[in-house]
Amino acid sequence: MTLEDRCKIADLYTEYGALLTKKQADMLQMYCELDLSLTEVAEQFGVSRQAVRDSIMHAVASLEHYEKVLRNVEKKEQISKLLYMSSRESWEETVAKIVALLED
């Protein structure tokens, strides 16, 4: 898993992690945030390495599905860009763009 993948998963986990099962959330956090290997996570849970891999893959698929449907992470990124660029526009234009984005 690349650093870019881990960053993407971390953003999705921050937004939707509460929607995962406790076990999925814990395994994903240990693997991505604490940088434990699949074997190390498996030892913590008393399961096979393959079981951890399957659980993490399912958790990531769930997070990606939530983002595809809700688009919260995408919207937050767009709002951040709009706010960064707001110095070039009037505040009213920026707010109007943010409201339009949120209504979508």
Image (cartoon, rainbow, N blue to C red):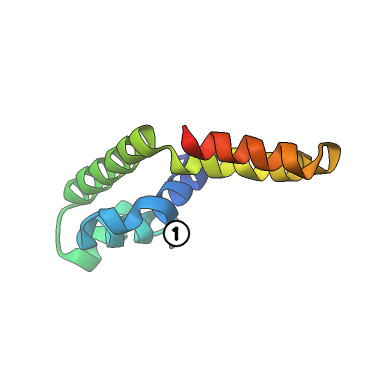
The percent position of residue 15, horizontal first and vertical second, equals 42, 52
Q: Residue 82, located in which quarter of the rendered image?
A: top right
Q: Is residue 1 visible?
A: yes
Placement of 48 over or under 60, stated as above or below: below
Q: Secondary structure at mark 1?
A: helix
- Please state which of residues 65 and 51 is positioned toward the viewer in this rendering: 65
Q: Is residue 39 visible?
A: no
Quarter of the picture containing the N terminus is top left
In this view, the residue in front, 43 or 83, is 83
Q: Residue at x 71, y 39 (%)?
A: 94
Judge from the rendering whether residue 3 lies leftward or rightward of residue 30; answer left or right.
right
Residue at the image position 33 percent from the left and 43 percent from the top: 63
Instruction: Work out whether 74 lies above or below 59.
Output: above
- Identified at 37% across, 32% down, the residue is 68
Q: Position of residue 28 (x, y in %)?
A: 33, 54
Please name the residue shown 47% across and 32% down the image: 104
Where is 67 relative to 30, above or below? above
**Amino acid type indicated by mark 1:** Glu
Report the residue marked by disc 1.
33
